[in-house]
Amino acid sequence: MSMLEEFLMSSARAVGSNIQVTLQTKFQTFTPDTFQRVLKEKGFSIATAQVSAPTGQVSQAQTFSKGDLIVLLGPSPSPQTPPPILFQILNMIDLKLTSDGTAMIDRIKEILTRLNIVPDVIASITFNCTTTVTTSQEPTKVLSSRLRPGVLKSMSKILGFPRLQLMTMRLGTEFPLEKHSLQVLLEPLVTAPKSQYYVNVIFTSDNQKDFNDFIRRFGEVVIDKIVKLLSKDA
């Protein structure tokens, strides 16, 4: 496969994909005015959106957008905690890819530097990616085949519902997610359950170096390897 073909396949996969990077600091390192000034100087346009706090309360917030990158201050989880910074990246899976002449992860780092955010002040940083993968094998059949033979048949008998299938696979290092943990969710895509997976990958850490290491490893190739491994001998 040529480099052009690989690029076109990557671009097609990325359309509709979404990444959210949420950064929580231990204490406030900038004012709202500084936040607005930094993003304006970088050419971001301003809009207003509704955001939900962890308490469920909905409030208005300013969003700053430039191309496929959206930045905003989220609601504070508590009165004593600074508001998190949310980076929303549309149509992208790999933060190492270039956007506006610079790798997306470097664009994010530039903004954090301007906001006086250094590794020591980071309380947590979370990567959350959602995408889809087209497959030649029906996802529910592949997922169901990963269970020990007879389990679904026995479950069907217990519940009185024939033809039970495994609809979701959730892999993780721990649950709920803690300071340094990973979670991968795979299930049939609602709009194309016989040919596509919905994939959600979450990584969280309180260490920027660990986060950078994960970003360096993660990309479409990783997702493809997971799906191919599931489909092997299914």
Image: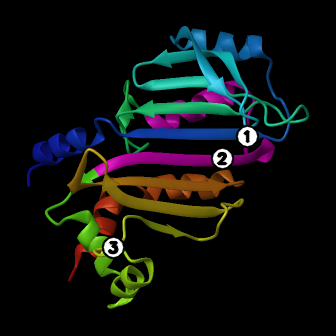
Q: Closer to the N terminus: mark 2 or mark 3?
A: 2
Measure how far apart labels 2 and 3 are at the Cα level: 38 Å
72 versus 38 height, above or below: below
Give the residue type at disc 2.
Ile
User: Furthest residue to the right?
Assistant: 80
Q: In percent of the image, x 63 and y 24: which residue is there?
A: 51
Residue 24 has which mark? 1
Q: In percent of the image, x 54 and y 58: which residue is there?
A: 213
37 in the magenta segment: no
> Dot 1, crowdedness within 10 Å: few (<14), some or many (≥20)?
many
Residue 100 showing in the rendered view: yes
Identify the magenta region: 104-132
> Dot 2, crowdedness within 10 Å: few (<14), some or many (≥20)?
many
Which picture quadrant has residue 28? Answer: top right
Mark nearest the camera among 1 and 3 is 3
Measure how far apart labels 2 and 1 are at the Cα level: 6 Å
Where, quadrant-wise, is the N terminus in this rendering? Answer: bottom left
The residue pinned by badge 2 equals: 125
Which picture quadrant has residue 218? Answer: bottom left
Give the residue type at disc 1.
Gln
Residue 222 drawn at (x, y percent): 35, 62
Residue 219 showing in the rendered view: no
The residue pinned by badge 3 equals: 164
Which picture quadrant has residue 54? Answer: top right
